[in-house]
């Protein structure tokens, strides 16, 4: 068996070298980790506290008024000025999972991580508790917002409020919201017990709503969420994900029985704000690997099938890689899949190392180091170890995207330009210019290069140049993992 392991490692390193990747590079993971969390300050909506990203100011202070409720706060998902709760809740869940799994390795950044989580959960609590029987799931008309290029501080588009209810269900967004609140309750359990209890109480209520009134929020809300954040995978994955997090947070057998009753055994080779199957299986597999509870063996097996679809040398791999070695899943914001899957690689590697577990993909012998090595290559690629020698994290390294698709970053700040910049007024001087953005959105990870490792750095190319909260949220854990290892 030792020969088998050594042979794999040799051929795997040859494989990486053939990609032209340095296997001895040492990016500054601690710096990247701090910046990955600083990014969230640039995405804040609402009344801002004193913060490091000073070019942002208060915005969205009337959010919720159209429904007679207070829905201020939360995050803009990317480069626009809309609050979509499905990706925001996923962002929150991933930030929380990172804080749970990598608390010690986060070191001095743990407080920044908690602050980023709390900014989201304060908003999600409002959405869940403002009106009995209703869950608010978004603020802002995406169709009118996307016709404008204006700072969030100048927003004059309709701040429509969207919700799901028993008659217009949304099991997907409700399940993800429950997951976010449950995961966050674990993060705050010791440092703020009162807040933690409020989070878990609300998570249980929202999960019951998701279970009892089943349906996709895309069907209920139509063009207000599609094609932006349609629930393409359906809602069963969010029911599994939400129940898995409530089981982790409470140990209540009700959630375990519900998980078993779901029969959610769909195969997958992706993990994202839309599709949670792989994440739920890795989360549940922990009980099998770390706690040696054989009840959870089926989830371990499903998690390993997922890994076999990701590993480049696996006979079951369904994952494409660029010539430079980057995982390439979809052309639209590909790095979102890279960071989310990389989170699963480092976390499952961690579980495997704890239990000294190995598995096989056909004749490929897989150890915890197999997953760790692939995860490191993905992180290092994002931080500049790639054919273009470009960091895909803004403000990290010497070469990084300068023209990101982001309204606040590309328009002058209120301090620099106090006069309002209207809906259409931002396009000609600022959107279409080839000049770099005036405001650096430190830590933002963009959509990334194409399948040939090329990145044009063009503001209009939103599939590659737009950052998003869920891209960053997923990489916090892996960055902490590698920062703690050096």
Image: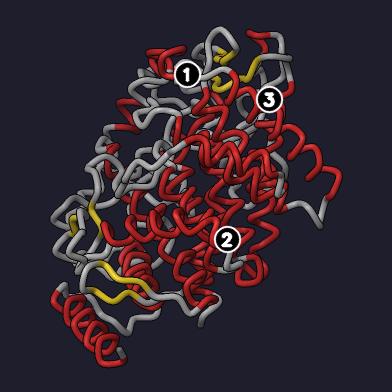
Q: Position of residue 315 (x, y in %)?
A: 17, 64
Gap between marks 3 and 1 measured at Cα = 18 Å
Q: Earlier in the sequence, mark 1 or mark 2?
A: 1
Could you tell me if the residues under marks 1 and 2 are in contact, i.e. CB atoms within 8 Å?
no
Q: Quadrant of residue 305?
A: bottom left
Query: In this view of the protein, which residue sits in the foreground, 48 or 234?
Result: 234
- What whole-number distance in Å separates the C-alpha atoms at marks 1 and 2? 30 Å
Residue at image mark 3: 128
Give the CA separation, mark 3 to mark 2. Answer: 30 Å
Callout 2: helix, strand or loop? Answer: helix
Camera-nearest label, 1 or 2:
2
* Residue under pointer 1: 215
Residue hosting label 2: 287
How many neighbours does mark 1 have within 10 angstroms: few (below 14), some (14-19), or many (20 or more)?
A: many
The residue that appears at 14% across and 64% down in the rendered structure is 323
**What residue sits 47% from the left and 23% below the top?**
421
């Amino acid at each position: 068996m030792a020969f088998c392991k050594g042979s794999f490692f040799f051929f795997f390193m040859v494989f990486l070298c053939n990609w032209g990747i340095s296997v001895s590079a040492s990016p500054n993971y601690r710096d990247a980790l701090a910046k990955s969390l600083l990014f969230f300050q640039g995405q804040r909506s609402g009344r801002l506290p004193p913060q490091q990203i000073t070019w942002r100011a208060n915005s969205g202070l009337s959010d919720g008024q159209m429904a007679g409720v207070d829905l201020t706060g939360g995050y803009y998902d990317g480069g626009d000025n809309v609050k979509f709760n499905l990706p925001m809740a996923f962002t929150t869940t991933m930030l929380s999972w990172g804080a749970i799994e990598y608390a010690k390795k986060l070191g001095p950044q743990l407080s920044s991580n908690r602050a980023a989580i709390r900014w989201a959960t304060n908003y999600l609590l409002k959405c869940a508790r403002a009106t009995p029987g209703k869950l608010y799931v978004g603020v802002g008309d995406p169709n009118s917002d996307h016709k404008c290029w204006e700072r969030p501080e100048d927003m004059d588009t309709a701040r429509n409020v969207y919700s799901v209810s028993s008659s217009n269900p949304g099991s997907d967004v409700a399940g993800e919201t429950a997951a976010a609140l449950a995961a966050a309750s674990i993060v705050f359990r010791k440092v703020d017990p009162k807040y933690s209890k409020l989070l878990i109480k609300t998570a249980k209520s929202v999960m019951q709503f998701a279970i009892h009134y089943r349906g996709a929020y895309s069907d209920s809300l139509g063009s207000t969420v599609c094609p932006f954040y349609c629930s393409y995978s359906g809602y069963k994955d969010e029911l599994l994900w939400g129940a898995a997090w409530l089981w982790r947070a409470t140990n209540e057998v009700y959630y375990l029985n519900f998980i078993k009753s779901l029969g959610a055994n769909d195969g997958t080779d992706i993990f994202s704000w839309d599709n949670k199957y792989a994440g739920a299986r890795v989360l549940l597999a922990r009980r099998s690997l770390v706690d040696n509870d054989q009840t959870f063996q089926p989830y371990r097996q499903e998690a390993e099938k997922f890994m076999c679809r990701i590993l480049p040398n696996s006979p079951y791999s369904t994952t494409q890689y660029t010539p430079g070695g980057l995982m390439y899943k979809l052309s639209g914001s590909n790095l979102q899949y890279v960071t989310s899957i990389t989170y699963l690689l480092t976390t499952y590697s961690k579980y495997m190392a704890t239990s000294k577990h190995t598995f096989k993909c056909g004749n490929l012998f897989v150890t915890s180091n197999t997953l760790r090595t692939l995860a490191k290559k993905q992180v290092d690629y994002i931080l500049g170890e790639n054919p273009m020698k470009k960091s895909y994290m803004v403000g990290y390294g010497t070469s990084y995207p300068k023209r990101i698709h982001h309204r606040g970053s590309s328009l002058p700040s209120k301090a620099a330009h106090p006069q309002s910049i209207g809906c259409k007024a931002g396009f000609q001087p600022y959107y279409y210019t080839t000049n770099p953005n005036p405001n650096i959105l430190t830590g933002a990870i963009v959509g990334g290069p194409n399948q040939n490792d090329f990145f044009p750095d063009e503001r209009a190319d939103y599939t590659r140049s737009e950052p998003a909260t869920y891209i960053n949220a997923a990489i916090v854990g892996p960055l902490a993992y590698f920062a703690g290892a050096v």
